[in-house]
Amino acid sequence: MNEIPEAGGVRGAANPFINGEDDAGGWASPVPPGHPAAALLTGHAVRTRCAAVTDHVAAGASELFTWHPERIPAVADYVAATIRQRYPDLNVPYHSRWRHFESGGPGEKLDRWQILCERGGLSGEADREERARIGIDLVIPSVLLDAGAGPDWRYRDPASDLSLTRSEGLGVASFDLFARGGFSAQPGQPLRSDAERLMRIDASSIATAFQVAQHNPLVGLDGRARLLRRLGEVAQATPAVFGSPARLGNLFDYLKAHASSGQIEAGFVLTTLLVALGPVWPGRVSLDGVSLGDCWHHPACTDGLVPFHKLTQWLTYSLLEPLEDAGLTVTGLEVLTGLPEYRNGGLLFDFELMVPRDPGFTAVAHTVDEPVIVEWRALTVTGLDLVAASVREALGLSAESFPLARVLEGGTWAAGRRIAAKRRPGGPPPFAINSDGTVF
């Protein structure tokens, strides 16, 4: 079984690796103390290693891309204009899965979460902690189901009778599945995600819930079902975090127990998720027997490894609201990085912040492990930090009041979709990446 580490000496510390047994017992950690993989399971590792790749490209040493930081101001102006258009008062929420749950139509929002809580009698002050557990129950499987849907998939939303696509469609489809009790193993308690039920989910269940048909194909269907089954298996094997019987929402109690004066660091949340849920991801690159998840090879780093942890960081961003709703304050958001995916990365590519040396790069589909994709993603992480700083300057806001989580939402992700729609019919990304539903 997996032992999830406590914060070493300081509750809420950013690197929660244990030296000894957890209070719940002595499970064998997937990342033992002192293991070399530990250094790669942090936001700091993502940022510093992506910076090393960027330095490599900026020095002209790359055969794949050239780097053009002089174009940062143009990107920042476009993003700042997008933010002002979408949020004139600059009151921008966090970039998270919760935005997709609000999808109702052009310029409209439908507060499905509030409706769900009201129907369940969970809107009162006394319900805050259970509401947080339910929010976590909802958002973890939803994020795992959030890889790119493909250009041909649609979800007919029963609440609005609209046809939703992409992340909005995936978000609402997973919300509806959750609300119907699709992840619950407890009769009469639909609003929960239990390991027992997750372990039984198959591709057919996902296909039915997501309205998949021959004329409505969903990319990576089998991979999504495998991820959910594996999520159930890992949660069941990790009672230190998810309890026994295992429920995803019990993560709230684990994080609350490791908070100090009601505060918990974003880095602690991220690393907890990376360690606790690391075994969920397909084994690709491993280090001394530990699968590194969304981590890939690039020669610019001394050990040749560049982590991104895109979906786990997306999950961390998506946990901020349920944790804060329950009264916890999440500090140190600056540790989290931008998400290197096809909207953020597509924005920077379309503005030619990075330019491929191969003129035929956009003409063929790529795989996620290709060095050119690894390099593009690393440049995206660094580029987003630079753009964020320029955006804040343009808006007259500080990093404290306008963290990267708000820049992304306002923001680079929306601007990436906006520029794609202007440049290509239907708004696809500038190049294609073959997805198995577990990274993009």
Image (spheres, rainbow, N blue to C red):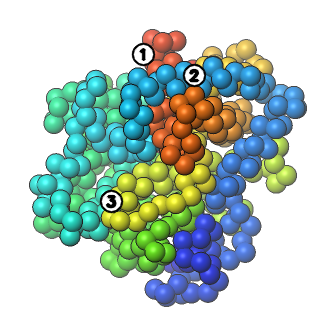
Residue 44, percent from left and from top: 68, 55
**Image vertical order of residue 257 relative to residue 213, above or below:** below
- Contact, CB < 8 Å: mark 3 with mark 1? no
1 and 2 marks in contact (CB < 8 Å): no
SS for callout 1: loop
Tell me: 139 left or right of 433.
left
Q: Which residue is most to the front?
A: 396
Residue identifier under label 3: 325
Query: Within the image, what quadrant is residue 216 found in?
Result: top left
Q: Is residue 342 left or right of residue 124?
A: right
Q: Which class describes the residues within 10 Å of circle 3: few (<14), some (14-19), or many (20+)?
A: some
The location of residue 23, given as percent across then percent down, is 48, 87
Q: Is residue 321 above or below residue 241?
A: above
Question: Judging from the image, what secondary structure is the residue with disc 3 in?
Answer: helix
Residue 216 visible in the shown view: yes
Query: Mark 2 = which residue?
Result: 77
* Residue 210 image point, x, y percent: 28, 39
Q: Amino acid under label 1?
A: Gly
The numbered disc on residue 426 is 1
Q: Quadrant of residue 338?
A: top right
Inspect the image, locate mark 3, and give the three-letter code of the amino acid beneath it: Asp
Marker disc for residue 308: none
- Spatial CA distance of label 1 from label 2 is 24 Å
- Residue kind at label 2, given as amino acid type: Asp
Mark before the other along the chain sequence, 1 or 2: 2
Locate residue 351: give its quadrant: top right
Rendered residue at 60%/32% (across/down): 393
Please provide percent x and percent y for residue 433: 57, 30
Q: Residue at x 21, y 44 (%)?
A: 112
